Image (cartoon, helix red, strand yellow):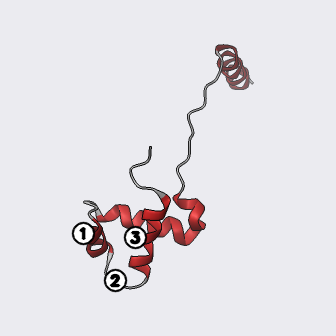
Amino acid sequence: MAKYDLAYKLAVIKAYLNGEGGYSTVATEVGITDHSTVSTWVKNYEILGESGLERRMSHKTYSVQFKLDVLQLLNNQLMI
């Protein structure tokens, strides 16, 4: 489970965007120890909207055969 849910992140971002303080002030008021967390959330929100705040699962698994095929392909390309 995520440490902070989407609604919480949006509330923090709105507080910053509404001028309730800078990154450090807003972070302190909501109990976040590192102001760079708020900065990252705001920047992601400004660039990507709400989708920039969602967690991404990137744990992909690949079969042994797939990995061997990739290595063989790379080896063949290096030989050319």
Rendering coords of residue 65 (x, y %): 69, 14
Element at label 3? helix
11 lies left or right of 36 = right
Residue at 52% of width from left, 50% of height from top?
Answer: 55
| Front-most of residues 51 and 76 | 51
The circle drawn on residue 14 is: none
Q: Quadrant of residue 78?
A: top right
| Front-most of residues 47 and 17 | 17
Residue at 25% of width from left, 60% of height from top?
Answer: 33
Q: Quadrant of residue 37?
A: bottom left
State which quarter of the image contains the N terminus: top left
Crowd band around label 1 with a 10 angstrom C-alpha radius: few (<14), some (14–19), many (20+): some
Q: What residue type is labelled 2?
A: Glu
Q: How far apart are marks 2 and 1 (CA)?
A: 12 Å
Q: Mark 3 points at which residue?
A: 12
Q: Which of marks 2 and 1 is nearer the N terminus?
A: 2
Q: How far apart are marks 2 and 3 (CA)?
A: 10 Å
